[in-house]
Image (cartoon, rainbow, N blue to C red):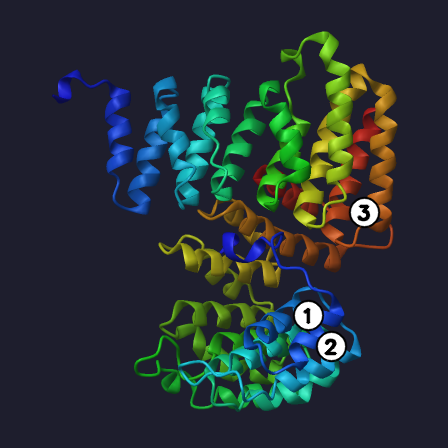
Amino acid sequence: MTEILTNTEILIEAVNKADSADGLLEAVEDLAAVKAVEAIPTLVEVLGYNNPGAAVAAVDGLIEIGEPVVPYLLANLDDYNYGARAWALRVFAGVGDPLALDLLLKAATADFSQSVRRAAARGLGIIRWSKLAPEKLLPAQKEVLQALLLTSEDGEWVVRYAAVVGLESLAKTLAKTQSQLVPDITARFSGIIATDTEIVVRARTKLAWQKVTSNE
Amino acid sequence: MEQNYLETGEAEQLTVEQAIANLRQKEDLGARYYAAWWLGRFRVKEPEAIDVLLMALEDESDRAPDGGYPLRRNAARALGKLEDERAVPPLIRCLEFPDFYVREAAAQALEMLSDSRAIPALVQLLEGGVAKAQFVPGKPHLVQPYEAIIEALGTIRATEAIPLIKPFIGHPVEKVKYAAARAMYQLTSDSVYGEILIQALAGDDLQLRRSALMDLGAIGYLPAGSAIAETLAENSMKLIALKGLLEEEINQNGNQAFELTQESIKVMELMDSLL
């Protein structure tokens, strides 16, 4: 039987049969390395296991495969396992496909899990805007800007931190095409530096402010 | 751990008045227990909240099947979060209480309050050293909550406890060993102890790796940055640990103008990669 299995099938088998945390990590790394579309369902399944090491390897592998992952992952999001959802959001963020834009917008502002909001906020900053039709660009970017401004007021420090990182990336994109929107971002940065209760959020915002204003 | 403790969006909402009333009544033990937790979680620092929590600390009615005092445990944990020094003497008295988990919660609370009045009572519990620090037969815990005691002494900067704490680096229970490394680093700033915790990040057990992450974050050991980022654990845990490093770096080397050091920027780059 084995001779008719492809290399990818053998590697998928190895993931399914792994019987220890370390064994699973190695099998997932091997499977991720082949960057095969056939590996997508198995790698997505790994996101739901409680094994952070294997999940990181699966996320990296899925991001490497890129756009073919997005429709499958959108159709197979696990609503009840928010660990898995946070990892999935990291995949969407890494691929940057505008197909996932609505999901990222909703997740950043309204998901009950702070890990999901965090990953989504980062993802909103690194959308591959060139994939979007030109007439949709400005309204979508305005929507992302509003969502990130809102997320920068989240109750959890790590979500505000991620929103600042997202706003910094967005500001760099907007500086080239829609520079009239950048002052909204720098004004918000000044507000955070003056008032955020967490010193690490203020520090990251200071860095973002420096990077964005030195580009002008 | 992330899934159990970090998500608070679904907590039942009370008002301050309801929580205080729930804690004052004696009929519904579940409501009392929840109210004690709630007052701590939402940092209700009103004097009346402290009053009822101090009463709960002496409660006799809520008893667990093992003879423990669940409400006292929750009340102690809440008082640790509320920064009212009236809680210090009662919490010190809790360190002598027969329920192990009340003693543990009290030691943790005293660490959070970081009050040097607690030092003699905490030191007393280390008496007998590593030799006496054995498991209680039939229980999942040692005779004293050593982890909490040692961490408290480190945070309170009890340098007089150094000779007592140092031998616990050799304790066979990993978490006690990490607690000793953490406290010794806080008390001596000797990097040897930070390195013990970095080594622990590569251990086989996810729980222990998480524990070492939290310890490194608590001491803000800057050389651990990259090792933290590469640890096989949840990103949310690693982010909390790196936050501890960044806070320590800013507090040590920051200034009025809030200039960012190269080290701070390095830690932020690591954090960015984990979002």
The reply to whether callout 2 and callout 1 are in contact (CB within 8 Å) is yes
Which subunit holds the residue at mark 2?
B
- Nearest the viewer among B251 and A139 is A139
Q: Is residue B38 left or right of residue B169?
A: right
* Mark 2 to mark 3 CA distance (whole Å): 40 Å
Say few, some or many: other residues with alpha carbon within 10 Å of mark 1 (under 14 / 14 to 19 / 20 or more): many
Amino acid type for the residue under numbered disc 2: Ala
Which subunit holds the residue at mark 3?
B
Asked if residue B275 shows in the view, the reply is: no
Mark nearer the N terminus (1 vs 3): 1
Question: Which residue is located at x 58 percent, y 74 percent?
Answer: B33
Q: Which residue is mark 1?
A: B39
Question: Which residue is located at x 39 percent, y 42 percent?
Answer: A49
- Give the x, y percent position of residue A116: 58, 40
- Nearest the viewer among A149 and A204 is A149
Amino acid type for the residue under numbered disc 3: Glu
Residue A23 placement: quadrant: top left
Q: Which residue is mark 2?
A: B49
Count all numbered tags in the image, as a single digit. Answer: 3
The reply to whether callout 1 and callout 3 are in contact (CB within 8 Å) is no
Q: Which residue is mark 3?
A: B259
Residue B121 placement: quadrant: bottom right
Q: Check disc 3 and report its element: helix, strand or loop.
A: loop
- Nearest the viewer among A206 and B181 is A206
Mark nearer the N terminus (2 vs 3): 2
Residue placed farthest to the top in the image?
A134
